[in-house]
Image: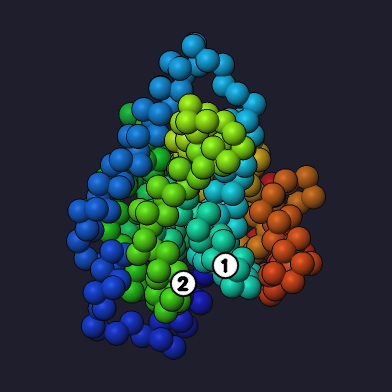
Amino acid sequence: MSSGQLARELRAHPPSGERPPAFALVGSGELKRSHRAFLLLSSIVPALGVLAAIALSWRRAVGVSDLLLLALFYALCGFGISMGYHRLFSHRSFRARRPLKVALALFGTFAGHGPVIAWVAHHRKHHTFSDREGDPHSPYAFGSGSRLRALRGLWFAHIAWRFSENVKVDTFRYAPDLLRDRDLRFISRHFIAITIAGLLAPGAIALAIGGGLTGALYAILWAGVVRMFLGHHVTYSVNSLGHFIGPRRYATEDHSRNIWWLAIPTFGDSWHNNHHAFPTSAAHGLRRRELDISALAIGLCARLGLASDVVAIDERRLREKELRR
Ligand SMILES: [Zn+2]
Ligand SMILES: [Zn+2]
C-alpha cells in the first residue's frame, strides 16, 4: 500500500480511540511477554537447529524425504511471505479469494516472522520512512561514515531491530484495513500455535508416509527448524542487503537495490529497488530476465480464478522513473 492509499484508507476508516482487547497482541502498546519470548526463541531455536542438523549429519546423512519436505515447506512459507504478507496484505497488489487469502496468511505465519498484522504494519512503516528517521529497519540507522557503522547498520537491519524499540508498531495506524478482517485477526492472534503447527507438520507427514518416530523427528529438524532458519535469513537479507548492495535502476528516495542472486530464494522480492519505485506492482521483476516466482504464481492464481485486480505498471511509467546513465 502506498502512503497516499494509506492516508485515504485512514480518512475513510479512522481508527477508533477505543482499542478492543482482542487486538492487544498486535496493537501499538507494549508487546506482550509471549510476543517478546517468540521473537527471542524464533531467532535462537532455528540457529541451534542448524548446528544440531550439522552435528547429526555426521551420524546419519540427510534423507531424500527430509530434503523434499524442506523444499515443500520452504516454498509454502516463501509464497506465504512474498505473495501473502508482502504483495497481498501489505501492498494490495492483487485481490485474493478467501481460500487463497487464508492459505497465504497461514503459510506466512508458518515462516515464523510473527503475526501478519504486525508484519504488515512494520512493512508499511518501512515504505513510509524508508532509510529515514522512523524506518524500523534501515541499514543506515547509525549513519554510513565508517565501515564499522555500516556493519552495525547491516546487523541492525538484518535482525537486531527485532529486539529494539523499533519492533513496537501502531497497527491501528498502519494496518487498520487488516484489523477489520476477521480471518486475519484470528490468524494474528493465534500466530504462536500456527507457527508451532508449521514446525510440526513435516513430522506428521513423515509419520503418515511410514517414516516412524525417528523419521518424524528428522523431518521436523530439517523441514521445520532448518527451513525456518533459511527462510528467516533470506527474507532478512532483503531488509539489510536489499538497501545496501546491488544496482539501482529507478529513482527512489531511499537506498533500495536489486539483487539478482537472491531472486530465486526470495521468490522475486530481491528486485527491491524495482519494488520501492512501484510498491503496488504485483510483479517485482519488471524485465523479462528478472525472474519473479511470486509474480508467476499470482498470474497463475488469476487464471484459475483465485486472484483478480492484479496491479501492473505500464511501460511509460516504468521509463519515466528510470535513472539516466
Ligand atoms: Zn525496503
Ligand atoms: Zn514492500
Camera-nearest residue between 12 and 182: 182
Quarter-of-image position of residue 157: top left
- The kind of secondary structure element at disc 1 is helix
Can residue 207 be seen by looking at this rendering?
A: yes
Residue 45: % across, % down: 35, 34
Residue type at mark 2? Asp
Question: Residue drawn at (56%, 16%), measured in percent from left and top?
Answer: 61
Is residue 259 in view? no
Question: 119 or 71: nearer the eye?
Answer: 71
Name the residue furthest top: 58
Q: Which residue is tagged 2? A: 183
Residue type beneath disc 1? Lys
Report the number of discs: 2
Left or right of 165: which side holds 270? right
* Whole-number angstrom distance, CA of label 2 to CA of label 1: 9 Å
Q: Is residue 134 left or right of residue 318?
A: left
Q: Is residue 141 above or below residue 280?
A: above
Q: Residue at x 68, y 70 (%)?
A: 307
Res 101 label: 1
Q: Where 94 sits versus 11, above or below?
A: above
